[in-house]
Image (tube, coloured by chain):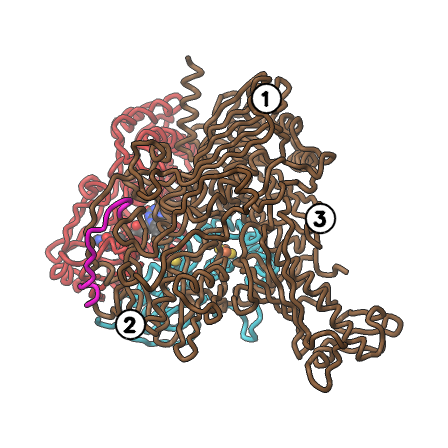
Amino acid sequence: MKETLVKVTINGKEVAKEIESRWLLSDFLRDNLGLTGTHVGCEHGVCGACTVLINGEPVRSCLMLAVQADGCQVETVESLARADGSFNHIQQAFANNHALQCGFCTPGFLMSLKSFMENNPTLPTDEEIREAISGNLCRCTGYSNIIKAVKEAYALNC
Amino acid sequence: MKPPKFSYLRPNDLAEALDLLAEYGEDAKIMSGGQSLIPLLNMRLSTPRYIIDIGRVKELHGIKEEEDAIVIGGMTRHVDVEKSELIKEKCPLLTEGIRWVGHTQIRSRGTIGGSIAHADPSAELPCILTALRGEIVVASKEDEFTLTPEEFFLSYLLTSLEPDQLIKGIRFPKLNKNSGYAFEEVARRHGDFALVEVAAVINLDKDGKVAEAQIALGGANAVPFVPLETEEFLIGKEPNETILKEAATLQLEDLDPEGDIHGSKEYRRYLTGVLLQRALHTAVKRAREGVVV
Amino acid sequence: MAQYVGQNVKRKEDYRLLTGNGRFVGDIRLDNMAEAAILRSSYGHALIKSIDTSKAKDCEGVIDVITAADLEGKVQPFTEFVEFTLPPNLEKDIKPIIKKNPEPMLAKDRVTFVGQAIAIVIAENRYAAEDAIGLIKIEFEPLPVVTDPYESVKAESTVIHQDLQNNIQSHFEVSVGDVEKAFNQADHVIRARIKTPRVSGNPLETRGVVAEYEERTQQLQVWSSTQVPYMVRSYLSKLVGLVENNIRVVAPDVGGGFGPKCAVYPEEIVIPYLSTKYKRPIKWIEDRLEHMQSTRHSRDQVHDVEVAVKNDGTILGLKDHFLLDNGAHNSFALCCAYNSAAHLRGMYRIPNYDITGQIVLTNKTPNVPYRGAGRPEAVFVMDRLIYMIAEKLNMDPVDVSFKNFITPEEMPYDTDLFYRDGANMVLENGDYPGSLKQAMKIVGYEQFREQQKEAREKGKYLGIGFSSYIEGTGIGPHEGAVVRLDSSGHILAFVGSSPHGQSHETTLAQICADEFGVSPDQVTVKAGDTSLLPYGVGTFASRGAVTAGSAVHVASKKLKEKLLAIAGEMLEVAASDLELQNGKVYPKAMPTRFVTLQEIALAAKPGPRCKVPEGMEPGASATHYFVPPTVTFSSGFHTAVVEVDKDTGFVEILRYIVVHDCGRVLNPMIVDGQIQGGVAQGIGGALYEEIIYDENGQLVTGTYMDYLLPTAMEVPVVEMGHQEFLSPRNPMGIKGVGEGGAIGPPAAIANAVCDALKPMKIEINTLPVSPNKLRSLIEEAELQEMH
Ligand SMILES: Cc1cc2nc3c(=O)[nH]c(=O)nc-3n(C[C@H](O)[C@H](O)[C@H](O)COP(=O)(O)OP(=O)(O)OC[C@H]3O[C@@H](n4cnc5c(N)ncnc54)[C@H](O)[C@@H]3O)c2cc1C
Ligand code: FES
Ligand code: FES
């Protein structure tokens, strides 16, 4: 199988690898780079567990070939904690508000929210928060603690 | 759920893309945002020998203003349209409607060309383009020409595009400052493909009567449907609720939606009437206020 | 000294999960690991005439292709799951017919449902494995397909498993009082057919197995995304013929379970077997398409029910005959069906009761108990009936409830039947009328009725609906805990349960911490690993806190006693005069003289410095297996306030209120989270989710585009009210809470929708209440009004 060279910046680090061009970005991150924090729940674009940031924007890594990420900045959940290992404001708010149970969906929510909060610096309405996370499925929490956490994350970020 | 083997081709400009299409088109799939194609690959419902990734074809990116029209390149992403100030000013119907496409994470990859080419009868863009009386710009190695939605959309997921052609972009007239417009949609859940949707533009004359009506119905037929008789019916009339109600159900019998588990044929047909009335109501209201929000 | 129990202690699980450092089965990568993909049946019912794997075996990167023939003599087929069989006294009492109906590992000459595993490809990676799947050639001979349970029970129906003679796999009857007499005395008899369709639990993490065999030591290490690692181990040992002690099954971080991961699947046996055969680690991760087809479904009951009432709303008796469409196999005996029968009367005093249940086979994916396990179906029947009685008698549904509640004065209340564990089903305590009153207060019932009238004048359709449930939680047979002090003075608690989101690492640490007077940070809880304890059961049926919680509580107490005894020797003070606080033991009379937990731990070691009193074993460890006398009964009231868009048929939930009793609350934040999450799943079943097959047995809802899980846009914040009636059936008074949230929503929401459209006569007797279905009901009702 012909391999294609992919050069990407992942969580601030440059990576260059030869890879089969059919490999999904999600598998590239998880299998080739060991970044297993990005989860796959459906591989057809609905659940959002695989959400990562490409050049700052949230995308489904299961709906992107690794080769399409060539030249891009990729951010995954592993990049969120501060240098000393402590939580960032969104992670902290999730922990404070019991916004995760099994935690499988959580990385996807965190990545979607990182981008959302950067694009919407002032506290949004509940309805806007709901819409912002509507592309991420959670089967455990019933969402209300996630919404609470988002509001607290805004407060923590001040 | 992993994509099958294929050869990956990544042209850097339009000429190269069209050359590749001319050579491999029969066995190739164009990939733009991949938001419809990759699920099909993952499920192995599509097994092309070649993937031609047009992501780097610069000529296909961007939104341009012409004298009385807007042109959007095929590779322009949904999110770029959603955030475009130009679109918001010159065609707010599109700004309003495009938010209904999937979720943010889909719109940050999905493209205008891909949405048009995919030709899902419930997709927002084909419906909006049809209501706007826009056209599709098609390019091949040989030539470049435009098609109307009626010419382009043939049936459910089927278009008149030939294997060596690609969608260069779409072009549509700007909305008049005083146009009233509306986009109405219902889906089972937020972000799902529409059960049905309606895009409508209404212009009133100085007496408040309907001067122009442009309507398109999505999810109500195999291709976006223009209810011509309904439009004609409205012209010259004072658009009060009774008239709008009558207009909304005038052509339901002409619709032939595909029924599925989310909505039967009858239900979709009926629902189209409900949404059309709501859309007309909003469009007329906005036309009266003369505001472009 | 409850310092931590009852507090909102933050979760110990969260750090790893929030930083991407969780370890789910799919995250495991081992040297030389191969990956598997599975070819599944595309037919609902067919004979397999031939399988040709030669092309697939030649495919690049393929190690081997395995079919049923390769397993013969190596891996035994499943027998029934003995864990779910009935206790002898219950068996004797109801004399059920239960035909054995085990599932093959791989289909051999016949497939009975779409998604059934036929062949396994082992390859260098999943991409290559899937390439080979496409090259396996199978010749099928299609057989007639049965998908409708009513067709399936007919004498002329195709029989799915010849050896069972017909498709009725189980049959049982339960009877209390004199139903015929009750019906003779009734002023009214109301009849209905009420259906809860097939749904899928759909944890966000699919199933998956990784197995590694170390030939040197003959150790087989298995990681599986399961709720029951001990059960996986025991069947692996039995069916593959391995020494049980050589198998270690670990459920690492598990991305949700809800029931579907609460039994052993063929892949959990065959993949480990193959790793012993090929001497390579093998990984199989189910993809979502496989999950929709092959991970077991649930619910799917149709009840034909009759209720006898007096003019004042008193219920005299109830008769029910129901079918449970279990798909192509049933390995769970009467589990969900009997639960439905036992719980159907719920909070109501119905002295005369007859119920017949039949488990019927069809060409669909087999069923499994899913969150609620037979109770949501029962509640949908009972609370729809309450609404219908109210309609018939022109009463307010809440008055019908008040008329028929079992009252606090009647507690403990003997329901006159056996529970599934064989004990008399006695509701130990609770205040059911009180919970409805509390719910009405929270919602502002009187004001709502006013608001409803005003809204109606503006053309808005608001409605309110109630549902109630009781639930036997914390079923046995047992759960164990080992609590230990290590040499560094740190406390460990090992349990046999196996969490997947329930926060055991936190709540069990709270229990332990309180006993030892330390912070939960000084306690590490480990679970989901068969190497921790010899016996374990698992996490399902709202049993984690009740059983594992009680085990940890008692084991901690035992260990504390021992530690005090050792400290007594060290300090030369009687143990009864000592106190343990903040990790130190000191004489009550002289707190400045103390020994630390670490010092005690060292003194517990055998040898010359040992201070363990004579007669005690050295070591700082205690074990307790908690064996509950029977289940504890949680209960609750659900209230839904909805707005119906009459023109489109869409339903919006405006408010949702749950008042519930789960006994002692270990951690309110976590309890509320369980309720909110359960309600979200219940809302899914009420409005969005349904597994649909076409008449050929093809699964129509095979993707997340068709099977609609609720998003944040569809689930409101649940408002909660709490009651706390401690159960006398375990030392801390805990009752289970895991499932309650999922039980009530269908009935509450359906009742609310009917209420919104009154006086129009809408009968919602099936789910989900989709806009299409509701519009059809509205149109029918409008037509009837015109006639
Ligand atoms: C969860 C989910 C929800 C969604 N919800 C919606 C929704 O509500 N509404 C909606 O409209 N869509 C929805 N979509 C689909 C999404 O909008 C797709 O992005 C869009 O349909 C295709 O655009 P794309 O750029 O991703 O195209 P691709 O997936 O790359 O291509 C789609 C098809 O178009 C062809 N193609 C692409 N570009 C061109 C071109 N320039 N010229 C010729 N052929 C071309 C490809 O060969 C392929 O056949 C959803 C998708 C997902 C995964
Ligand atoms: S795994 Fe990518 S959206 Fe579900
Ligand atoms: S926490 Fe389990 S899926 Fe969200």
- Which three-letter amino acid code belongs to the residue tagged 2? Ile
* Quadrant the N terminus of chain B occupies: bottom left
Q: Chain of mark 1?
A: C
Which residue does the numbered mark 1 point to in the structure image? C182
Q: Nearer the viewer, residue C769 or C599?
A: C599
State if disc 1 and disc 2 touch (CB < 8 Å): no
* Residue at point 28%, 68% (across, down): C123
- Which three-letter amino acid code belongs to the residue tagged 1? Ala
Q: Hue of chain B?
A: red
Q: Residues within 10 Å of mark 3 (few under 14, many from 20)?
A: some
State if disc 1 and disc 3 touch (CB < 8 Å): no
Is the residue B173 above or below the residue A35 in the image? above
Q: Give the secondary structure at mark 1.
A: helix
* Residue at point 45%, 39% (across, down): C97
Q: Chain of mark 2?
A: A
Q: Is mark 1 within 8 Å of ligand 3?
A: no
Tell whether position C109 is magenta.
no
Q: Hue of chain C?
A: brown
Q: Nearer the viewer, mark 3 or mark 2?
A: 3
Is the residue C11 above or below the residue A123 in the image? below
Please give the label number shown on residue C728: 3
Q: Is mark 2 within 8 Å of ligand 2?
A: no
Q: Nearer the viewer, residue A59 or C147?
A: C147
Tell whether position C47 is magenta.
yes
Residue A119 visible in the picture: no
Is the residue B34 above or below the residue A82 in the image? above
Q: Quadrant for ligand 2? A: bottom left
